[in-house]
Image: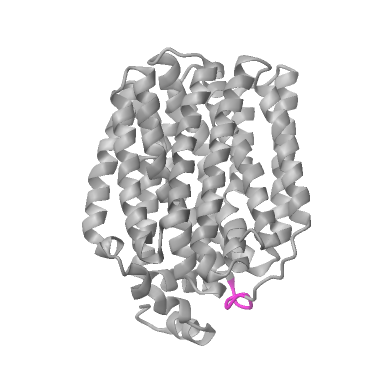
Amino acid sequence: MTRNPEFRRLWAIGALGGTMRWLDTLVLALVAFDLTGSPFLVSLTFFFRMAPMLFGIGLGIIADRVNRKYFLVIGLVIQAFIAAVMASLLIADVLVYWHLAAGTFLSGIVWASEFPVRRTMIGELVHPERLGRAMSLDSATNAFSRIIGPFAGGVFMATIGPEGAFTLGVVLFISAALVATTLRYTRTESAGSHRGVIADLAEGVRYIRASRLMVGTLVVTLLMNVFAFPYMSLQPIIARETLGVGDVLIGLLNSVEGLGSLLGATLIASFALPRHYSRIYLYGSLLFLVGVLLFSQSSWYWISFIIVFAGGFGMSAFGTMQSTIMVSAASPEMRGRVMGTVAVFIGAGPIGQLNIGIMAGIYDPRTAVMITAIMGLAVMLVATVAFPILRRADSMRIDSRLRAMNSADLRRMAESPGGD
């Protein structure tokens, strides 16, 4: 992988963009809370950020029809422009909540292209036997950026202010765009690129339905984004209001989850084999939900610090194996649509954000996190029973027939009245 220059470029783009993404997550929560004083509106901000994920499969179809390199460059330039506008509004001291919500939504549209564009390109440019390690390295880098990003965000909030964070974002996104322009990439011809969008969409749905492994992976993705990850929007508020710490320690708390993720991803990259993938994914997801539940019950900062660190291991297992399983199980010509579908299921996150925000308004942030974590553990246990393939050591081998499908197979499946 280190000898693959195109992977190195995609890795660098992910590192630069990921650093700003995690920095932005902390800064958005604190700025929204300072502007409104409302935990619900903080969660609503993240609703706007996640909502564009619902268009993920559409972005995947578009990505199958155009050169992903250009898609990637344009998205990074748009991100830099949004960051510049936000920094300017803050410097002029005219930022209001709707500015924050609109900028977050536009930024979310670009983030929604991460799976059908950059991660799909990794799957296309890395040899299949090295794909698991490539995704692990990418996940480890994302975890490392999560260490740097939130801590830097906390320092900015305590010193220069949020305008400094968004100014840094301009630099990071422009740098990533420049790296993207140097990629040597040729578009892979898609099986559905010459047919209509509806036909492509139907074909993608039928293709995924044929795989219990992919369906199970998507169900876990949906549950995690509805019941687990929404807690992150309230974590800074709980740290400030309940744990009673300042912005720097809030950033440190957010960062230590990234440290746990980094260590977890490093272990996965070093020791995980294809037969381990689905088990790592499933049990790591359960570990993260347990960590969220324990965090909601802690009243001491350093206990919370340890809990969040341990939860990071579960987060790395989920994040690394989600992309690895889906890319490995899909044929090359279907990967854009498959990863676009992943983005759609991540797009269920806005439902979780509204849910946890409403409960935080009715009760308090800690109670809202506790209730969602309990609900998440309950439905995850149901999914564990419903999709036994996720618990099987040979799940990737069972599903490997999908990787061997050619275009004719795909068309026959799409035209079959039964669909499966």
Main secondary structure found in the magenta portion: loop
Image location (x, y in percent) of residue 191: 58, 78
Question: Is residue 191 highlighted in magenta?
Answer: yes
Q: Is residue 59 at least partly visible in the picture? A: no
Residue drawn at x 51%, y 44% is 51
- Given residues 278 and 418, the one toward you in this image is 278
Residue span colored magenta: 190-196
Q: Quadrant of residue 352?
A: top left
Q: From the viewer's perspective, is 106 left or right of 285?
A: right
Residue drawn at x 36%, y 74% is 397
Locate the N terminus and report the quarter of the image it occupies.
Answer: bottom right
Image location (x, y in percent) of residue 329: 44, 69
Image location (x, y in percent) of residue 331: 50, 74
Q: Is residue 135 at least partly visible in the picture? A: yes
Q: From the viewer's perspective, is 207 left or right of 175?
A: left
Q: Quadrant of residue 192?
A: bottom right
Residue drawn at x 41%, y 58% is 272
- Given residues 145 and 371, the one toward you in this image is 145
Q: From the viewer's perspective, is 160 left or right of 331?
A: right
Question: Is residue 192 highlighted in magenta?
Answer: yes
Residue drawn at x 64%, y 21% is 156
Locate the C terminus and report the quarter of the image it occupies.
Answer: bottom left
Q: How many marks?
A: 0
Residue 372, above or below 206:
above
Residue 241, above or below 40:
above
Image location (x, y in percent) of residue 241: 41, 14
Residue 82, above or below 365:
below
Colouring mode (rainbow / by chain / secondary structure / one colour): one colour
